[in-house]
Image (cartoon, rainbow, N blue to C red):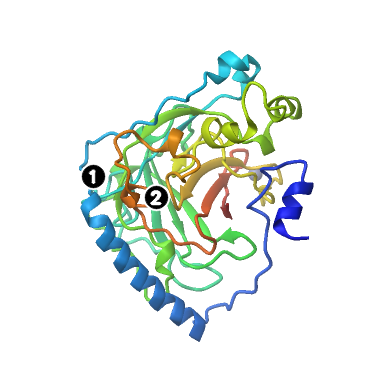
Amino acid sequence: MNRRQFLASSALPLAIGCARREAKPATGVVTAADRERIRNDIVDREKHLLLREPCRVQLGAVRTTPKPGVDLLKELPELKVLLRVTQRLHPRFGDEPKPDFTKLGGQFLWPSAEAWPDCPTYRIPLVPVLQLRIEDAPAGFAFKPSTDLLQLLWSPRDPVNGVISSRVVWRKASSVGADLAAPPSLEHAFVGYVPVPCAIFPERVMEFPPLAIMPQQMRDTIQLGKPIAPDDYTNLLSASPGTKVGGWQRYAADGIGCPTCKHSMDFLIAIDSNEWQPSTAKRWKPTEDPDTEGHRSAAGFNFAKPNATVQVYMCRRCDAMPTTAILCG
Ligand SMILES: [Zn+2]
């Protein structure tokens, strides 16, 4: 069965993208293919940086998501129970923010005396991906008690069975001194997994779940196509694309049971290759961004699948708050 046939036969047209694929990683070994990929990624990154140079955004700028073309709650008031607030982060290219700022990539607030974590599979250092201050998280986004800084790191290599080795660290920013650990060596990294340092321009946006994880009755209503076409719901009215915190996952994901308590984990963060796609630009391209590609993919991600998103989940039932990162899309 090819992909088109699979989708046609599926009762859940959005239940795509996050299925696990079998893979056998070469533990701790850098193969000839890896070396070629590392070289190619560096060439791509250099091109990316040249293209992004005219697209610098100054700290303090804002990004504004256009209002939806349809008042969904007026048309379908029963959806009100599904409404959630996400924080779109709008990462953009520019001068790297200070180490204690919310940011993608670059220098994190990490004490030099603290060991830097390695990927257990590939035995190379994890890389800094997102640092989030509590004031840049959406309302109701619970931090670990007594902390105000979240740091997401992951392995700069392709996922194994869909899962990227990752670590979420919670800190009290004021408890970290001035002596910081430098970002790790990227000698064996696939640079497409290492974000170009970006400032973020947070914006709170209301969103609704994708069809695949909606209650059946509401999904049936939208799939009837009146008053809203299902494609319009998916592209323009449901979950925001792009890098964001909280709200709804854009892709249904399987295998997100907590390793400790086995309950389903909560969606936490999406780190996206693109902030919008041509199909979603009408709704999700901020009004301040010009009609160029330069602002759409500032971080330069290039994952195992083109245009993919990494969705991070966390279990809030367990004190250790275990997390997992899954490549979707
Ligand atoms: Zn748990």
For the N terminus, the image quarter is bottom right
Residue farthest along the bottom direction in this orientation: 32
Residue that label 1 marks? 57
How far from the left and from the top, in percent, is residue 158? Answer: 53, 67
First of labels 1, 2 by sequence position:
1
Q: Is residue 61 left or right of residue 77?
A: left
Depth check: give the residue in front, 223 or 19. Answer: 223
The answer, for residue 53, to whether it is visible in the render is yes
Three-letter amino acid code at the position of disc 2 = Leu
Q: Could you tell me which secondary element the residue under label 1 belongs to?
A: loop
Image x and y of residue 270, in percent: 49, 45
Q: Residues within 10 Å of mark 2 (few under 14, many from 20)?
A: many
At x 60%, y 42%, the residue is: 315
Depicted 139 relative to depicted 145: above or below: above
- Residue sitting at x 25%, y 50%: 55
User: Which residue matches tag 2?
Assistant: 130
**Can you tell me whether the CB of the residue at mark 1 lies under 8 Å from the nearest atom of ligand 1?**
no
Three-letter residue code for mark 1: Val
Q: Secondary structure at mark 2?
A: strand
Is 5 in front, or is 240? 5
